Amino acid sequence: MNRKREAVFMGIGILAGLALSGPTAQAATSITATLSTQPIYVDGQRVNMTAYSIGGNNYVRLRDIGRAVDFGVTYDATTNSVHIDSTQSYQDEVQSVATVTEESVRATLAQLRETYPTGTVYPTPYRSTSGGPYHRGTHCSGWATLCSDAAFGNLPWRRVDNPSWNQIRPGDLIRYDNSGSGHVVVVISKTDEYVKVTESGLNNHARWGGQYFKWWLEEQPGYTLYTRYPE
């Protein structure tokens, strides 16, 4: 292993130890993340890497480090575990159409609920690279896009205006106009009468379990579905 990778892996170990320490774990429910403006350099070259400032420290995605330093990072959905391989080069994880099912989407949303329970501030602004309809990364659209990217990876987006009720599936985004600029929610489950959703408001706190009735949604202006399931 070269010295650059050794330094990175040592840093990862230190950060992991700090993250698991008592005071940090106890304060996890009150952590607030803000976008860091500090530039990041690898071997003297500035790299494009999103960092969040939490408790005075910068945190970046492990995949972004793997890409910049060139080591393997993989996720095993069956065991919900992350694997680092210092002997392999980094490769982007491509979400396959065949691997995305309603069951896999529901499982991803369940994991997000454990990570960001109701009242938790999620990392904001969330910057998506999936080319979706929202790029501001704050409030309801930031949370909805974060959930969608977690479930669908980089699969393409598709917009459906005035969707029929049978077109709606778990993980889909439903938008409607309100007195502000509009609101968007993420579908968790659906019955014949309503959808159960996760959403966020202006305070950037995740919320789970809200219900929107079919008759009400279909009467709202701007009623739109954003889906990433294949046609």
Image (cartoon, rainbow, N blue to C red):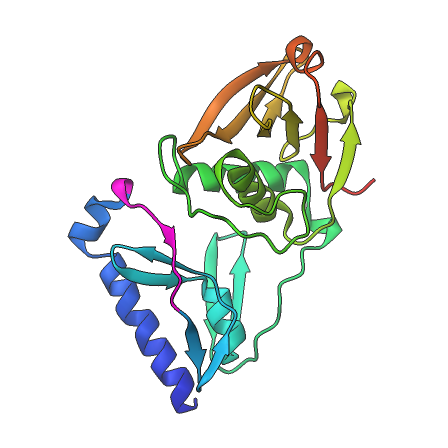
What residue lies at 79% left-to-right and 43% top-to-bottom?
Answer: 230
Q: Quadrant of the C terminus?
A: top right
Please state the horizontal and vertical placement of residue 63, each as a whole percent of the image: 50, 66
The N terminus - image quarter: bottom left
Which residue is farthest front? Answer: 180
Q: Residue at point 71% right, 23% down?
A: 222
Bounds of the magenta span?
Answer: 29-38
Left or right of residue 98, residue 64 in this image: left
Residue at the far bottom: name it.
Answer: 2
Q: Position of residue 107 (x, y in %)?
A: 55, 39
Q: Position of residue 17 (x, y in %)?
A: 24, 64
The residue sitting at the right extreme is 231
Q: Is residue 139 left or right of residue 37?
A: right
> What residue appears at the point 71 percent right and 51 percent down from the top-left corner?
155
Q: Nearer the viewer, residue 46 or 144?
A: 46
Please say if 155 is above or below 228: below
Q: Is residue 210 above or below residue 154?
A: above
Task: Please check the rendered image and state whether residue 191 is part of the magenta-colored stretch, yes or no.
Answer: no
| Residue under the image location 52 percent in, 79 percent down | 70
